[in-house]
Amino acid sequence: MLIRRETPADIDAIRDVTNLAFKNGPEAPLVDWLRADVGWIPEFSLVADGVIGHVVGTRGYIGDDFPALGIGPVSVHPDHQRAGVGKALMHALLGAAEARGEQAVILLGSPDYYSRYGFRLAAEFGITPPDPSWAPHFQARLFGEVPAGPFRYAEPFNRL
């Protein structure tokens, strides 16, 4: 499976796969808003095999100014789910994040699923979610020393 960076020619296909994966939820508009935001990091928008899947990581912060990578959404076309596409995308993104020197990667998702990638509940590190009700699903993977504090996603997440 080939994992590569998003190109401008992929934008419509990314929107399509995200809409299919999330049943036309707010995730596809979120990706478009993130792409236009200062928190967008092109190296962390990855697609799999002709855009059957997509993952994006954008700039977030722990506390006022400690940079961290916020992951999401992770989208896989329904016809390709449970076939390793999401796994390949996550491994590629985490490898790129570590190689680029990111110290923390944060996401909201199933602990049963994301623990296989080394994620643990963020509360174990003293990192708190923007919404306290997210705590049972709010996770972090650390690559270095990280302060405790509240996590703030890129601004477009506030529109959801």
Image: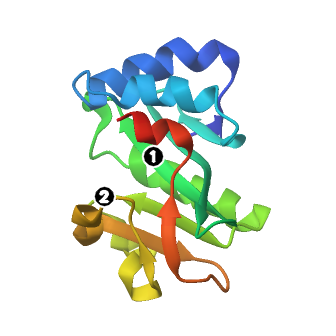
Residue drawn where x is 29% and y is 31% of the image: 21
Label 1: few (<14), some (14–19) or many (≥20) C-alpha neighbours in 10 Å: many
User: Is residue 112 visible from the viewing direction of this image?
Assistant: no
Label 2: few (<14), some (14–19) or many (≥20) C-alpha neighbours in 10 Å: some
Residue indicated by mark 1: 72
In this view, the residue in front, 30 or 87, is 30
Residue drawn where x is 67% and y is 86% of the image: 145
**Residue lying farthest right?**
100
Say above or below: 45 vs 51.
Answer: below
In this view, the residue in front, 4 or 21, is 21
Residue drawn where x is 50% and y is 36% of the image: 156
Disc ID at residue 109: 2
In this view, the residue in front, 107 or 117, is 107
Find out whether the residues at labels 1 and 2 contact each other: C-beta distance under 8 Å.
yes
| Spatial CA span between label 1 and label 2 | 9 Å
Could you say where residue 138 lies in the image, as x and y percent from the top left?
A: 34, 66
Earlier-in-chain disc, 1 versus 2:
1
User: What secondary structure is found at the residue carrying circle 1?
Assistant: strand
Query: In this image, 22 relative to 70: left or right?
Result: left
Could you say where residue 19 lies in the image, as x and y percent from the top left?
A: 32, 22
Residue drawn where x is 43% and y is 41% of the image: 158
User: What secondary structure is found at the residue carrying circle 2?
Assistant: loop
Say above or below: 126 vs 89.
Answer: below
What is the quadrant of residue 26 in the picture?
top left
**Residue lying farthest front?**
64
Residue type pointed to by label 2: Gly
Residue type pointed to by label 1: Gly
